[in-house]
Amino acid sequence: MRGLSLHRAGWRRALPPPPPSLCAVRKLHAIDVHHRVKDVDFQAIDQKWQRRWRSPEWRRWQRTDSQQDKPKAYILPMFPYPSGTLHLGHLRVYTISDVLARVKQMQGYSVIHPIGWDAFGLPAENAALERGVHPEKWTLQNIDAMKKQMQAMGGRWDWDREFRTCDPAFYKHTQAIFLSLYERGLAYQAESLVNYDPVDRTVLANEQVDANGCSWRSGARVEKIMLRQWFLKIKEFQKPLLEDLDALAENGNWPERVLAMQRNWLGRSEGTKLWFDVASAGGHSFNPIEVFTTRADTLFGVQYLAVSLKHPIVQDAALRDESLRAFLDRAQHLPPDSKAGYLLRNMTARNPVAGVVEGFEQSIPIYAAPYVLDDYGSGAVMGVPGHDSRDHAFWRANTTDSPIRRVIATQPGETPAPLLPSTESDRPMLETGVVSSNIPDFGGLSSEEAVEHLGERLRAAGKPVETTENWRLRDWLISRQRYWGTPIPIIHCGSCGPVPVPRNKLPVKLPQLLDKYFKGKSGNPLEEHPTWKDVECPQCGSAAQRETDTMDTFMDSSWYFFRFLSPRFDQEAVDARSANTGMPVDVYVGGVEHAILHLLYARFVSKFLASTALWPQGHLSKGEPFKKLITQGMVHGKTYTDPTTGRFLRPEEVDLAKSSAPVIRTTGEAPRVSFEKMSKSKYNGVDPGATIAKYGADVTRTHMLFQAPVSDVLEWDEASITGIQRWFTRILRYCGGVFMPPTVLAKFQPPRDLDMSLSDILTWLVSVKLLKVITINERRPASSFDSEEARFIASLKIEEQLLWSKVQETIARVTQSYASTPPSLNTIVSDLMTLTNTLYETPHTSDTMAVLKYLATCHLLRMMAPMAPAVAEEGWHMLHEVTAIKVKTSPTHPLRGNGGPSIFAFPFPKAEEEVIKKLNPTMTTVLQVNGKKKVEAQIRKPPVGLPVVDLVNWVLGRLAEQEGGKEWLSKESGKLWKVLGSKGVDTQAHLLIPLIPIDCDIKIAKGGRIVNVVSLKKADRKKWESEVAN
Ligand SMILES: [Zn+2]
């Protein structure tokens, strides 16, 4: 037994000397650490490979690769609006989709990964108005600039599928889809009170108006005006749009958050339809007012009715009431949450329970109120100020001092007192409960029972009542009074009405206008153009006018993913065969800001197309366009604020010489550092183009993926990007072949199949004399091995077995991380970094090891290739320049010519998971305390050649992972520590062996099979032993 007095040596010298057996590796390590990362020119590597990927040979290879008979994978990032500059949010979404597309390609799929341009829309038109440049010119310039940036980020884009929605060849089909909807009765025109932006001079959708009633774009106060508008009947599809969300929820394919937002937007609620009779003093008779409520149990508390400004009863009354007309005029400019109301004269309503339940005979006032939406229910609501906040606020604003009735109590038998104005308790009760005890026949019933009983009683009395559902969803307003959009293909004829443009006359093109036309213009250029709108009616030939509205750009993006499948197919929006094979999109990647509208419209139009000849097999996926949805988180920028004034600081105001301790230049104070949404006013924006130019695309991409899980907010911090640079530098250095000695290289020829099973690898190595298998003899008969494979594996050294099991574990984990929803890309980076370290740290033990390291490097490079394609290509090339010399000029070897056409010509590695267990050899080890056996356990065999201190730590570490070992070694409760501590002995951790106390020493024997912890306080030893021993 070898004794080592580690105790004394330990606290004088903190680190042990490097063991001789690891010298070679340590040296490499040292070179690496000292070698400055600058020495690898990552931009040059990017450029070299990007050039290669653009070459005709490459494209030819890619085409043959994707045309083989393979399953398809359609990976799609939400296509960009061509603003002209790629921001970090773009870079994030395109990196994620590019990584997924590359993985799928390597896994044997025929991948569609297209990009196009959502090119219509207001910003281009606004730019035109400001600068006097045609929106098309502006858009095309921006597309050009962004395309260069998309190429610079190293994306594998199907450029031959590229299109832009403002191209007549594209919008011809947007128009055709509109006509199909129109022919099906799903597109219609209606007078509607619309949100009008007086600055942009356009109509806005409800969702483009913020909570304060201002335009999302111009910030102007939105006005309400009546306009004839085009709508799509998305409400016809509301049921499947809601129900099919359940299918999307399966396996977490769509994020729960997005599903909830969709459900909420559709807003299905169950309720009751009731009719209130109207009594009029003026001799007019009116139809009963229909009301929808989700709280029919509060009917006894109705104190007024409120009807929308467009309600027939209001329109009728306005004919005779001048001040009502004035109110209606004024109301157009009121915000949607206004509490204004107008009491209709000479008419009252009657509660439906009047005459059915005693005590409800009194008449109820009727108000015209802007807060009642025209299209909610029937444009009328029952006002229950005691049990609804908005009704309460309205009632208090319009009738100052009247008490408010409460009809729902928290407990049976209660009669809640009325609410009095200006008192503490003047608040509505919003929850359900039990009907107040003073209501005849209903008192004491629960809210639910009351609704049911009410239905029965009203029906029995011959009064109308209906249980029904209501939806929050409104039809989709697609009209825009703008130039830069798809013209709506309708011609208005004086005698025929609206007539569709015949399909053979599509596209209806936008008129060509000169740049200067736009400068400072407002309004709709199509309306004002001298000749564009004048045409003949296609039906009767008389003079008619084109529709001058264009479509909302959400219309373009509601079907563009079909177009990518047959982008040059002229007859139809999509070739039905391509739609059948290509749809649905397998993975859709984009920002959560599109969780509601874009996805809802795209689902609607896809469901519609699935009911046409364009997507015959659409029903197989219920017409759902996106199988999986990945919503990436936002990117936040590092923000510096003055701690005293709270002012945002410009980058030049902060001295970043010491990045860990920034200083405000003028004051010398430390700024407050936070991460916030990037914006110009916070000076925290980052230009990805500049980052790519500085660090290279692959470093930038991988850093971005490493910094946060895909769905989380990404706090962009450049300071740590050197971590990725260093990692890539180490990989490339490794690919130089340092692990393969010349003697092995002389015999080595890379295999044709890099993904052989371990058995096949070992058989091959034996055949080329790079491995000697344990021979069977009298001492080791064949029966001592479970199988021939076991004999081969047993011939490997422990380090070889450990390396190979690490490689296989990593492949399994990384494959799983790429496939999960959302993919766990940040953990892939850390797993691959760990594997790189393992490669560096595993000593060279044999010729076999050199070959295993070669294969492990091939696996590592292929696993990282989707994230860092150029670095992986470069590494692959370097590796095979050294290791594939023998096959360099072979006519058929896949690795000929320094590694074949590309790393992407080789499949993604597949884990051989069964072999992992076989590669984990164990040994029995005994833990002694003062020479007495305390624990015996099976632990994994340590790597050979570990220096003694490392070996002790390794063995104790494995022991401490098990229950028996923990009982002794755990710092919190281990007997070794507890007893010593209770004796007043110093229980600091040993400097070299942290699992034992400082006043102990270790004796180790038989390669770690016996470890003896010895107490150094000889005087205490006897006592200690007797206590500790069991
Ligand atoms: Zn006509």
Image (cartoon, grey):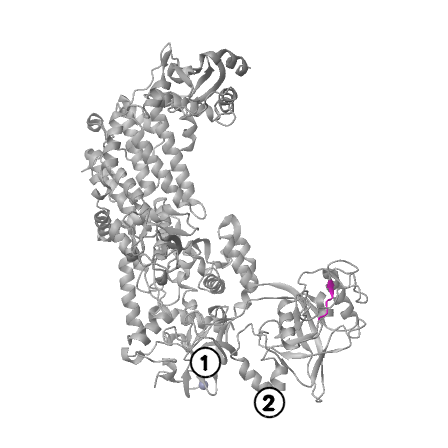
Q: Which residues are magenta?
A: 404-408
Q: Residue 75 appears at what percent x and percent y? A: 39, 53
Furthest toward the left, the residue is 889
Numbered badge on residue 772:
none
* Vertical position of residue 216 compared to residue 263: above or below: below
Residue 897 in magenta stretch: no
Furthest toward the front, the residue is 667
**Ligand 1, image quadrant it occupies:** bottom left
| Quadrant hosting residue 956 | top left
The answer to whether mark 1 and mark 2 are in CB contact below 8 A is no
Q: Nearer the viewer, residue 387 or 524?
A: 387
Q: Nearer the viewer, residue 685 or 924?
A: 685
Classify mark 1: residues with Cα within 10 Å, few (<14), some (14-19) or many (20+). Answer: some
Residue appearing at x 72%, y 67% in the figure? 406
Quadrant containing the N terminus in the rendered view: top left
Q: What amino acid is at disc 1?
A: Val
Residue 122 visible to the viewer:
yes
| Quadrant hosting residue 548 | bottom left
Looking at the rendered structure, the secondary structure element under dot 2 is helix
> Dot 1 corresponds to which residue?
499
Numbered badge on residue 322:
2
Give how far apart the Cα atoms at labels 1 and 2 are.
39 Å
Residue 406 in magenta stretch: yes
Whether the residue carrying mark 1 lies under 8 Å from ligand 1 is answered with yes
* Vertical position of residue 652 compared to residue 520: above or below: above
Residue 189 visible to the viewer:
no
Looking at the rendered structure, the secondary structure element under dot 1 is strand
Front position among marks 1 and 2: 2
Q: Which is more N-terminal, label 2 or label 1?
A: 2
Quadrant containing the C terminus in the rendered view: top right
Q: Tell me if 298 is positioned left or right of 734 in this view.
A: right
